Image: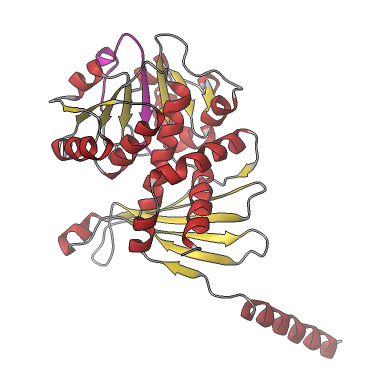
Amino acid sequence: AASLYSSGLQQQVATRAFATAGFPPPRLFDYETVTSNLTVADAIESVEAAFKALAKGKVDVPMPMHIGIEESSVAGPGDCHIKGGYVSATPTFTVKLACVSFYKNVEKGLPPGSGIFIVVNAVTGTPLGVFQENRFMTDLRTGAAGAVAMKYCSSPEQDVVGFIGCGAIAKNMARAAATVRPIKGVAYAIDGAEEFAAEMSAELGVPFEVVSSAEELCGKSDIIYTQTPGASTVLEKDWLNPKGVTIIASGSDQPTKCEIPPDVLAASKYISDLTKQTSKVGELRSALKAGVMTEADVHAELGEVVNGDKVGREGNEIIVVDLTGTGAQDAAIGQVAWDKLSQL
């Protein structure tokens, strides 16, 4: 019996070694290759399709994993997020590792965030490509989600678009918004609004106005994108356009963050990207904690609006679209990246 066990074990080891040796190594796409070949426009169609599939239960999206790196003499501070997903009947799935808030990097001349996408063959389970994207692909798929939210949750006459926070994500939101309809931009940030407005106006060929406060921006805007670090709320209910406004919030992606006050959320038609996620790490979390909303108050997930199962804008209402970022979006941009860059 012992010899049979030993023989069987040797056979398993040999089979495993053969199987492992039979896979080619994944291709590595460096940051320059990724950033010079992908745009937010590449991602919009695939991300919209991913939201449709998500609402139909055709996406396997586990809850994100969060690793907190506490500050010490040898590490941190920083955070690591791991997300992933598989969209049914697509040839790949994606796992993403994103590191953020490593603020001590700035002292060393390094960015505070980095990250990779791993795109895996859904037939064989072998990694196809490793994309050193340093949050670039994450920002692209976030911008694409912003375009989908604007397309389905605002009306055609809503064309004054405000941006609270004017960093990399805001640029992709502006690029994405301009693919939906012609816009007039309004920008506010503690730092960088002038540069953002000048760059986006030149790139997109649309007018941009820089204002001195978030309150002024809210009074002028039909649609508001918020993409700040989420350390505190960025607007108030009394500031909002009485003709109706669509707020597309993407700054909250962990339990310590919040951009939108609970009373605004409670007064809104609230739409999540994924309710099981926004209730834990999104804007919805703060409204639940404050006791002003329950999950039953969620109007829809974005994919349900995209699919036509739930209605988007109706009249002069406040709509909040809570974008925490889903593994479905990561799977979508991963597929796009592999399809495009593997041909290089």
Q: How many marks?
A: 0
Q: Is residue 267 above or below residue 73?
A: above
> Does residue 253 appear in the picture of this structure?
no
User: Along the horizontal axis of the image, is 153 left or right of 242?
Assistant: right
Magenta segment, prevailing SS (helix, strand or loop): loop
Which of the image's four quarters has the N terminus?
bottom right
> Does residue 148 appear in the picture of this structure?
yes
Image x and y of residue 45, in percent:
50, 40
Residue plotted at (38% across, 59% down): 34
Q: Is residue 230 above or below residue 12?
A: above
Q: Is residue 306 above or below residue 218?
A: below
Residue plotted at (35% across, 56% down): 35
Image x and y of residue 104, in percent:
21, 58
Image x and y of residue 300, in percent:
54, 24
Residue plotted at (28% across, 64% down): 75
User: Along the horizontal axis of the image, is 81 left or right of 107?
Assistant: right
Residue plotted at (47% across, 11% down): 314
Magenta residue span: 233-254
Q: Is residue 237 magenta?
A: yes
- In this rendered view, identify the residue nearer to me: 173 or 252: 173
Q: Is residue 328 above or below residue 220?
A: below
Image x and y of residue 81, in percent:
42, 52
Q: Is residue 332 magenta?
A: no
